[in-house]
Amino acid sequence: MTNLRIPGPTPCADEALQEMSRQMINHRGPEFGAMLQRITAGVKKVFETKNDVFILTTSGTGAMETAVVNFLSPGDRVLVVSIGAFGDRFADIAQTFGADVTKLSFDWGTAADPAKLDQALSEGQGYKAMLVTHNETSTGVTNPLAELAAVGRKHDVLVIVDAVSSLSAVPCRVDAWDLDVVVTGSQKGWMVPPALAMISVSDRAWKAYDAAKMPRYYFDVGKAKKYLETNQTPWTPAISVFFALDVALEIMLAEGLENIFARHERVGKLTREGVKALGLEVLADERFASNTVSAVKVPQGVDGKALVKLMREEYDTVLAGGQASLAGKIFRIGHLGLVTEKDITDCLAALKLALPRVGFAPASV
Amino acid sequence: MTNLRIPGPTPCADEALQEMSRQMINHRGPEFGAMLQRITAGVKKVFETKNDVFILTTSGTGAMETAVVNFLSPGDRVLVVSIGAFGDRFADIAQTFGADVTKLSFDWGTAADPAKLDQALSEGQGYKAMLVTHNETSTGVTNPLAELAAVGRKHDVLVIVDAVSSLSAVPCRVDAWDLDVVVTGSQKGWMVPPALAMISVSDRAWKAYDAAKMPRYYFDVGKAKKYLETNQTPWTPAISVFFALDVALEIMLAEGLENIFARHERVGKLTREGVKALGLEVLADERFASNTVSAVKVPQGVDGKALVKLMREEYDTVLAGGQASLAGKIFRIGHLGLVTEKDITDCLAALKLALPRVGFAPASV
């Protein structure tokens, strides 16, 4: 079986995939209503929140847009903390809808520094919100979100979080860390196919919603809230993925959140130690290295694209390349959702065979 | 098996459902790329167009938003032709994003009159676009789109069409009728689950796109065009529904478009004649009655909600209720996509048994 080692879509549980082939039902009928209620309750547990949670039919980027347009007005000052391609995307979205964006960028491969965030929020008065990536999929770095959120709280700005590739795989404790808006996507830690995204909304965020003037229709969380009162979604939902998520949540809650987090910690560490043992270098600062995706530097003399192709074609192992300024410079190994130690050791074994075939001559292995 | 007779999500072909349970693949890899290319070509055939066609991960309402925000600027004068709830929704979306909307409304149950459209476009100078529903799902009426589009063409406005519940089931000839922007959704005539929407964009619409200033990010068709050049989608797509659509298109093209249209004409007529034979009345003006969905008036003395509940609970037949001002006044029978004469005769037989149980006493049957 193919070893799908990209940071999403991730492999799905067999039980979830089986549900995908169920026949359609009425999305305005009682069966869907009961399922939506059950799933929403389960998703809240994984978000570790009492806040409102909604499930949208869209990808992670649509969820990021949802997190922006519902809570801000054109002209609002917004600080975007960016440590990679997805932080930059958050800034682009906010700018597109008219926010007055200041970007606080950190070198790709490093995490955001809470002290620098504190300084930026102190210097630039009048910020309405900070947008921050929890886990930067493009660089394999996990931000110290609890600390960053505390700084945001101190400055009384809305804390809006892209947790697409973190939540449900590594701790993202919405209530404990007092996060206002948090979004994630079904094809990451949730072990189901893409098409659904989840968003949590705090009371503070609802107040901002009431005043926010950016235009929104499909992504309007107010409409989602109104329809959820009758156990419906405002628009036709991706029913099949709901079927799958229903059983995936059972699996997740049976394993237990803390066990899931511990498993991701183990496979993350195993991946990083494994690639180092092969003579390769991880891009991320080890203190903030992600337990859901590892970015590995393409070694001198190796064609990164050729490596990814060889791994796919001859070792049935699918890796991801680099994005934006990292294209060709890194490859990425996804290890979130349905992932075991064996998936990683298999991947490492394949890498060990493939690397010399694309010109890799390690200094000392 | 449940007789799912709502106007979407519609029953899916078994072959399509089987594909839904396939394991995930890399959406940036060659297998997905080849499939996207193949599906886009197939969708173009069904749209009967040489225009660009894109497949978005969203529901029909997201596609309607896409049709608005890519081609208009805030302040643009727009005429919205509304014959029901979905025409009103098109107006709401345009207004939300800042268009200067004039609504040309017709009584629910009737179609739009091309002469009145001509008059409205003559009187109100400076219209940039007309938005029109092809098939109004809330009333079971199909607009004379070819004629309406010709009027729009004459006045040199962009013709933007919601064909969510028509295209692929009844003729919606994008090139022959010279339609600029047309949207539809996977859960209607295409016989696959919800999560995907399709949009076609004419050269004229691309010119409007270049000047359009409404904000868009997730729904930006320019991004979709750029990514399609490398056989990708800008954001993570609903891969499973792509798998299903791949085989559904094979089934559709094997049946042949004109045969599909003829089948829908037969089942549409069968439905209308059947409900009339039961002593019920169809809401739609017969000349414009839809061949994808029939709205049936709830007869005097009958509780419409109780009828729909009884049909579901005891006859395993799922009907839709009325929307907006028609709630409680009509019920709707969907007959699009995977539908045969037998589905309709079964539904009518169940109705015949259920109606007297909810207080129906026909004048003469």
Image (spheres, coloured by chain):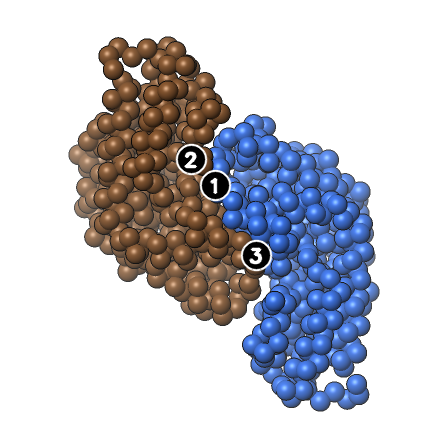
Chain colours: A blue, B brown
User: Would you place residue B281 above or below residue B116 in this image?
Assistant: above
Asked if disc 1 and disc 2 are in contact, CB closer than 8 Å, the reply is yes
Please give the count of numbered marks on the rendered protein: 3
Identified by mark 3, the residue type is Asp
User: Would you place residue A72 above or below residue A142 in this image?
Assistant: above
Between disc 3 and disc 1, the foreground one is 1
The residue positioned 46% from the left and 27% from the top of the image is B312
Q: Residues within 10 Å of mark 2 (few under 14, many from 20)?
A: many
Q: Residues within 10 Å of mark 3 (few under 14, many from 20)?
A: some
Instruction: Assign a secondary structure to mark 1.
Output: loop
Residue that carries the numbered disc 2 in the rendered image: B4
Query: Numbered disc 1: what chain?
Result: A
Q: Does residue B178 appear to the left or right of A113 in the view shown?
A: left
Q: CA distance from mark 3 to mark 1?
A: 37 Å
Q: Does residue B149 appear to the left or right of B82 in the view shown?
A: left
Q: Which mark is residue A92?
A: 3
Identified by mark 1, the residue type is Met
Q: Quadrant of the N terminus of chain B?
A: top left
Residue that carries the numbered disc 1 in the rendered image: A24
The residue positioned 78% from the left and 54% from the top of the image is A261
Give the image location of residue A86, x and y in percent. 62, 59
Q: CA distance from mark 3 to mark 2?
A: 43 Å
Instruction: Assign a secondary structure to mark 3.
Output: helix
